Amino acid sequence: MAAAFDITPEKQAGQLHFLSSQVVETKAPVLTPKDVDLSGQTAIVTGGNVGVGFETARQLLSVGVSKLILAVRSEASGQAAAEKLMGSRKDGPQTVEVWKLDLGEWASVTAFADRVGKTLDARPDVVVLNAGIICAQPTINPSTGHDEDIQTNYLSTVLLLVLLLPILKAKPSAATATKDPVPHISVVSSIMAHWAKFAERTAEPLLPSFDNKATANWDMEERYSASKLLALMFMTELSRRVPRNVAIINAPTPGLTHGSSFMRQTSGTMLGLFIGVFYRLFGHDCTVGSSQVLAAAVRAGPESHGHFMENGKLRP
């Protein structure tokens, strides 16, 4: 059955809708233990040490998740985040673990998935693939030879998604509050995926067309938008092949958020100053952004399988 949207694709991709979504639309509320109980469950949050990822991790703990895995590139930063998250919970039943994950390296992605499969007795019931990057200048990953935005936001993210799926299918849940919940995998997306011009769409082969560092027309926003569009397209197609009783796969956007360090590569520049002012005027804080993510990762049902979500709603 086709999803019923409250907006057309054309309006969804418009700048006026973006402003309405940010400023006017009602947001999905922050979850409380009265809304959901994740007791016994394990959750993974990539990029869980800062910004939206950190706040997503904090909110997961607040609704009772028993084991939380922060998948981070910097283990030192991850440990600092874990200590801050645990706070008064240090003597309680909840645990936060920090696992190494560098989306810039194939080996790190496969090693992380292998560790999930070999060391966890129960499956992760909530997986939030949040880690991402936006490069201020053309950047080629020295390990893979691919454009850094494409490598991180698309290639490594969907590789991890594919590697985790059979683990989620094979392992039992340790949930105690809900009998055999269907695992959720949420690939954090962006409204900017709808804005991609995607000039590379006709290139054959496709991926090398993103890897020319000297491209005269390279654009920071366009490259990020294309990387998010590719991930969204992959997620949509994958959801047609993965039954929704195996895993509910969706793609929420946290919206424009300030205080996330997402645009850190522009720090100290005039562009960075302009972006900072814009984010403060039209963005919301990470608490609000993360609640939009968890509306998909925790509350959304099978109707969200294969769909983009904004403010807790299915959107084209």
Image (cartoon, rainbow, N blue to C red):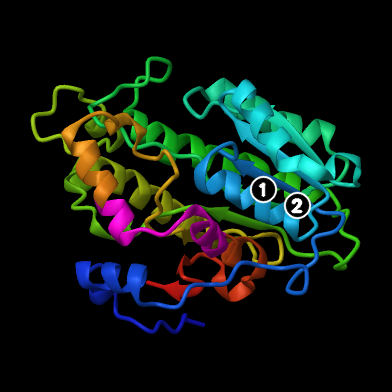
Q: Position of residue 205 (x, y in %)?
A: 27, 35
**Residue located at (21% from left, 49% from top):** 198
- Give the main secondary structure of the magenta stretch: helix
* Residue in front for this viewpoint, 286 or 103: 286
- Image position of 105 with respect to 298: above or below: above
Look at the image and tell me in which quarter the C terminus lies: bottom left
- Image position of 141 with respect to 48: above or below: above
Q: Position of residue 34 (x, y in %)?
A: 77, 74
Amino acid type, mark 2: Lys
**Which region of the structure is painted magenta?**
278-293
Are the residues at dot 1 and dot 2 in contact (C-beta closer than 8 Å)? Answer: yes
Q: Quadrant of residue 67?
A: top right
Judging by the rendered image, the residue that carries numbered circle 1 is 165
Residue 15 is covered by the magenta coloring: no
Number of marks drawn: 2
Whether residue 171 sits left or right of residue 53 in the image: it is: right
Whether residue 111 sits left or right of residue 311 in the image: it is: right
Q: Position of residue 48 (x, y in %)?
A: 60, 40
Amino acid type, mark 1: Leu
